[in-house]
Each structure stands twice: as structure tokens, then as C-alpha cells.
Amino acid sequence: MTLTILGNNSALPAFDRHPTAQIVSVGSEVILIDCGEGTQIQMQLYGQKWRKLNHIFISHLHGDHYFGLPGLLNSMSLLGRTQPLNLYAPIALQAILDQMMLAADSQLNYSLHFHPLTAGEASLLVENKSFSVKSFPVEHRIDCHGFLVEEKSPHGRKLLPEKCREYQVPTYFYHRIKNGEDYERNDGFTVKSEWVTIPALPGKKYAYCADTRYTESFIQHILHTDLLYHESTYLDEEAEKAAQRFHSTSKQAAKIAKVAGAKKLLLGHFSSKYKDLQPFQEEASEIFSNVRVSKEGECYEI
């Protein structure tokens, strides 16, 4: 599972940083989280293919998180997309898109399935054989959600050949017992799958904490993630402003990562007042050591 940052700035584009958008690649699929202005251009620039995109998640309806969506949807239609697309977002976005299509007398060439997020509630949004996506509420000026992407273990259970030999399981049955099927020997004795296998390494977990002031209210949803992306709009000297505007500072993001037991923290959603982002790294590192400032176009292995 990988994460590619398409945009990591807050409301105003600045210093060649763009509004929020990111791609998570899981197996053969990609999902898009938020879609600020210029997202489709950033996708082209960094080699992200819309043909693998089946799910889009919009955290909230501040423009820097969804103004790029109408253009992306229309472009995919013009380029010949026919496969259905799933959109998960606050309910008001459906009326906005419908009105835009009506005003332009336009129609998409593919089915757009709209899945409304329930304000203030955590929900399981997607679950398939490769991954699941859950939403959880954060604390922003308007209704806003974060997202947890969990990869399903790509390896199933791990076979223990020495145990198979001990229990006289023939080699031709190894694949089946590894997949959970029990083996019945000729003498009538049943060899349980769990006797000769062990759980494989679990799939990776990625948490995206959208615009939010400092709060530990959603910690239970992001525990022990392999990678945590948390907004850090301001440096610590602006903590009061951050609270007033329902945003977080670099040190507050680091504290959340520490409390949640995250393995790695990625900072983003920077205010346009900052050109140099190195101070964000330095401040967060005082609290949480494994931290990086996100960089547009960079691909992070989860």
C-alpha cells in the first residue's frame, strides 16, 4: 500500500503547494482522498491513472477539499470512462453536483454512485477482498470526517511445513490447508488448519485526519496505524489561532501520533503564510521522532 501526495496546502495555493488531495494505492486499485483545485492536473503530473480509480472520499465541504472534483468527474467522462464510480461525501455535495450538471446541460457517461457520510458518526464505507475504508468524525468548523484505510493481509496464513509433516499432511493439500481447510487423513483423524499454520502479517493501516482542531476524541479510530497523516496548519506559536479556526499545530499533530501509537507521522495542510516548512519538522520531532513533512509528488510506502 502506498500514499502519493497530490496537494498538501490549506485554503490558498502558495509556494508551488496545492490544495489537499492524495492517492492511496492498494493492490490493483487506487482511491482518492479529497480533491482540491487542480487535482486532475496533479494526477497527470505524477502518473496517477484514473482508470484504476473506483472510490473518491471527500472529508468536508470547504472548497480546498473538493473544488477540483467537478473538473475531474467531467474529464473522466470526456475521456471515455464507462465503469461506475463511488463517491463518499457530505450529503450537500450531491445537490451541488446535480445543479452544476443541470446548469451546463451535461451528463456523465458513467454511473456516479453517491454515498452520503452521516454527520458525527463513524461508518464502514467500503469493504472488499483487498481493503476496507472507515470514516470517523473529527472536530472542524463544519461537519468533517477522517478516513482509515486498512489493507487486507495479502498473504493469508503462513504454512508450517514441519508441522504438516508431523501430522502427515500430503504436499498436494498444503495450499488448501493454508487457506483454512482442514485435512482428513485415511485413518479418520482430522488435522485442523490452525495446527499447521500461523497468522500471516496483518495488512497495513493508513489514517487520514482531515481538518481538525486538537482533540483526542477520535483516537480509538486511528490506534497503531502504520502511517498517520495529520493536518498541521500552523506552528506552535499560533496555537490560539489554530484553536479558533478549528485547526492544529505541528506539535499537536505529533501529540496525537504519540497518543495513538502511530508508527510514522506525516504532516500536511500547511498555511500559505509559511514558505519554509522545516520548522514544522523540528517542532513535531520534539514530541514524536518518526515524523516527516509531506512533499507533493512523493510516494510513501505504508
Image (spheres, rainbow, N blue to C red):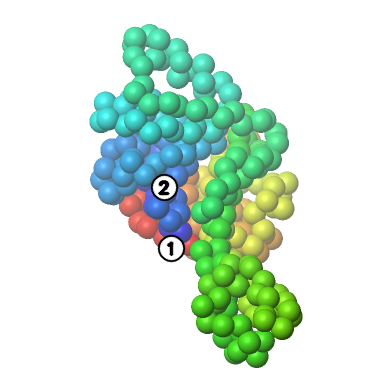
Using the rendered image of the protein, determine whether residue 226 is visible from the camera's viewpoint.
Answer: no
> Whole-Å distance between the Cαs marked 2 and 1?
14 Å
Which of marks 1 and 2 precedes in the sequence?
2
Residue 213 vertical position relative to residue 205 in the rendered view, above or below: above
- Regarding residue 109, the answer to whether it shows in the image is yes
Residue matched to label 1: 301
Place of residue 187 in the rendered image (x, y in percent of width and height, measured from the top left)? 72, 83
Camera-nearest residue between 62 and 102: 102
> Quick one: 176 or 72, which is closer to the camera?
176
Looking at the image, residue 232 lies above or below residue 153: above
Number of numbered discs: 2
The amino acid type of the residue labelled 2 equals Val
Up the image or down, 173 lies above or below 22; here it is below
Measured from the top left, where is residue 255 in percent x and y?
64, 58
Do the numbered discs 2 and 1 sit on residues whose CB atoms are within 8 Å? no
Residue lying at 70% horizontally and 78% vertically, measured from the top left: 191
Which quadrant would residue 26 be assigned to in this image?
bottom left
Instruction: Please tell me in which quadrant of the rendered image residue 121 appears.
Output: top right
Q: Nearer the viewer, mark 2 or mark 1?
A: 2
Residue 62, numbered label: none
Query: Residue extending furthest front?
Result: 186
Q: Which mark is residue 30?
A: 2
Residue 70 at x, y = what percent?
A: 38, 25
Q: Please, what is the three-letter code of the amino acid marked with disc 1?
A: Glu
Point 55% across, 63% down: residue: 153
Which residue: 58% across, 67% down?
179
Up the image or down, 89 lies above or below 54; here it is: above
Q: Is residue 138 left or right of residue 267?
A: right
- Find numbered disc 2 in the image and state the secondary structure of the residue it sits on: strand
Residue at left offset 51%, top offset 16%: 95
Image position, residue 213 (x, y; %): 63, 42
Q: Is residue 99 left or right of residue 82?
A: right
